[in-house]
Image (cartoon, rainbow, N blue to C red):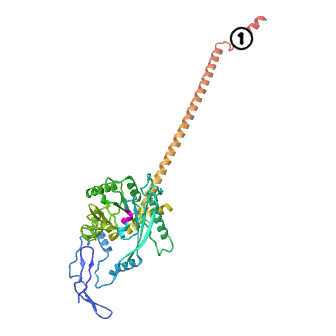
């Protein structure tokens, strides 16, 4: 019988093992011994200690000990419990419910969008389209068409919805040709948000667009303005996956150069395209597969749902030309295999999660903020009472200082006004005093003049004296 054990990780580099003094037996309900575990003896092995735990040189010992105490103890089980079966439970529930995936294809007419979708899922979702006659009237706006189908593979059901955008980029004036597409994506977000706000949310139908495959014309030069503007408008609302359509019209060197120019334009305009996520705990094989997928972006694809004979006699999906056969499933001929690997086989769930956790949440946050009052950031903010009190005291002191400065300024203004008024009054009094002084001086001079005349015996009024003398002679 094997001996069970447990391991307790202390977080400081030491572990409590199973070997020591004392033995205890654990038995099952029927009396059978399940394991023998030995309790560790404190003196059996030395315990590693950090300097400063007993008042030594390390001042951060208390903080380190508290952090170590908060870490959960890692323990190995003595026997099988059963929670390792959780992934199987999730798998059974997911298979029972089935999966939903919505893909949007955008590009000019004639780039092979319908053919590529049929090739990706190996089913006839799209039937051959009738080519319009030269004189036939065509619509002047971008249409939004969706087709749904439920497909099954190895017992796994997938409800696939493909959203097509006929008319995009087909007109002389393509201004705002992306607006119906943006409105459709936002309408799907709004419909899902409305379902979340219902009282009964048992069955949520996810019609959000999880991936947008954007078809680029194989010009070999660079992205056109309509390509850049479309991706700029949609890269925050949907997972963008750019592909080079009809890559069999270009040589390998032209494809490499064209990809470099496309990536340069995307980086220059700050456009975010979907990249397979990388996790730390993944194995080397998965990491290498992700790196290979990333190195192929944008994918140079060739679509074909017909079988042709290869030079060695095999029947393959591809296109036959006078100079050879292009095999769709051959990685040496195109990047279709890597596109299908990322979109379907390895990262379909990541596309769904990124749509729900990032793109939809950002849209939902902006939508709710626009509908209501902005939330005060300090409502649920943890604050220190002492720091809060100090902050309030500082604000109060600043308010008092401001009031004191205002009062000083008002006082100085009043003093200046009073001084100006007093100065004006003083000037008026001085002027009045000067006038009165001048009048008194004039009166004094007149009195002095009269005094001198009296003292000299002269009449005060010569005219009156002469009159009297003249009257006396007449007698």
Q: Is residue 467 left or right of residue 350?
A: right
At x 39% / y 77%, what residue is drawn? 94
> How many discs mark residues in the rendered view?
1
Indicate the position of residue 172 as horizontal and vertical percent values. Answer: 43, 52
Displayed quadrant of residue 26 = bottom left
Indicate the position of residue 162 as horizontal and vertical percent values. Answer: 41, 67
- Mark 1: which secondary structure? helix
At x 50% / y 48%, what residue is drawn? 407
Task: Point out the image quarter for the N terminus.
Answer: bottom left
Residue range (magenta): 112-116
Nearest the camera: 125 or 15?
125
Nearest the camera: 147 or 95?
147
Indicate the position of residue 472 as horizontal and vertical percent values. Answer: 76, 7
Q: Is residue 167 left or right of residue 33?
A: right
Is 83 placed above or below 373 here? below
Is 154 placed above or below 457 here? below
Task: Point out the image quarter for the C terminus.
Answer: top right
Q: Is residue 383 left or right of residue 58?
A: right
Nearest the camera: 161 or 319?
319
Whether residue 147 is visible here, answered yes or no, is yes
Q: Is residue 398 left or right of residue 431?
A: left
Residue bearing mark 1: 465
Is 442 placed above or below 390 here? above
Query: Magenta span has 144?
Result: no
Displayed quadrant of residue 355 = bottom left
Disc 1: CA contacts within 10 A as few (<14), some (14-19) or many (>=20): few
């Amino acid at each position: 019988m094997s001996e069970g054990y447990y391991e307790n990780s202390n977080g400081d580099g030491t572990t409590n093992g199973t070997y020591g003094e004392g033995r205890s037996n654990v038995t099952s309900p029927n009396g059978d011994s399940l394991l023998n575990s030995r309790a560790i003896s404190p003196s059996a092995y030395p315990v590693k200690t950090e300097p400063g735990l007993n008042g030594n040189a390390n001042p951060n010992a208390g903080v380190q000990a508290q952090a170590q105490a908060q870490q959960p103890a890692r323990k190995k089980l003595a026997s099988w419990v059963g929670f390792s079966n959780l992934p199987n439970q999730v798998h059974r529930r997911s298979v029972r419910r089935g999966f939903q995936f919505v893909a949007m294809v955008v590009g000019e007419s004639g780039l092979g969008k319908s053919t590529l979708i049929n090739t990706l899922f190996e089913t006839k979702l799209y039937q051959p389209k009738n080519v319009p006659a030269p004189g036939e009237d065509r619509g002047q706006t971008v249409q939004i068409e969706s087709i749904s189908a439920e497909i099954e593979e190895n017992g796994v059901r997938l409800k696939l919805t493909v959203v097509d955008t006929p008319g995009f980029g087909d007109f002389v004036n393509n201004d705002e040709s992306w607006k119906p597409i943006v409105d459709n994506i936002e309408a799907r977000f709004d419909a899902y948000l409305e379902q979340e706000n219902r009282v009964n949310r048992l069955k949520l139908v996810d019609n959000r667009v999880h991936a947008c495959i954007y078809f680029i014309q194989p010009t070999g030069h660079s992205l056109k303005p309509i390509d850049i503007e479309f991706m700029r408008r949609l890269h925050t609302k949907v997972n963008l996956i750019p592909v080079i359509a009809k890559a069999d019209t270009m040589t390998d060197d032209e494809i490499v150069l064209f990809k470099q120019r496309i990536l340069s334009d995307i980086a220059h305009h700050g456009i975010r395209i979907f990249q397979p996520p990388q996790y730390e705990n993944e194995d080397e094989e998965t990491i290498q597969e992700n790196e290979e997928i990333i190195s192929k972006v944008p994918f140079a694809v060739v679509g074909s749902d017909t079988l042709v004979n290869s030079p060695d006699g095999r029947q393959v999906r591809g296109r036959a030309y006078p100079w050879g056969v292009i095999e769709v499933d051959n990685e040496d001929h195109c990047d279709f295999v890597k596109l299908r690997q990322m979109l379907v086989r390895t990262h379909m769930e990541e596309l769904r999660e990124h749509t729900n956790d990032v793109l939809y949440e950002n849209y939902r946050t902006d939508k709710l903020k626009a509908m209501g009052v902005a939330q005060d950031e300090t409502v649920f903010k943890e604050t220190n009472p002492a720091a809060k009190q100090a902050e309030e005291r500082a604000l109060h002191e600043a308010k008092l200082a401001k009031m004191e400065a205002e009062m000083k300024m008002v006082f100085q203004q009043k003093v200046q006004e009073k001084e100006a008024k007093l100065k004006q009054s003083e000037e008026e009094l001085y002027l009045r005093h000067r006038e009165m002084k001048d009048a008194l001086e004039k009166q004094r001079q007149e009195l002095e003049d009269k005094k001198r005349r009296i003292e000299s015996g002269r009449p005060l009024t010569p005219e009156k004296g002469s009159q009297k003398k003249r009257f006396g002679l007449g007698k």
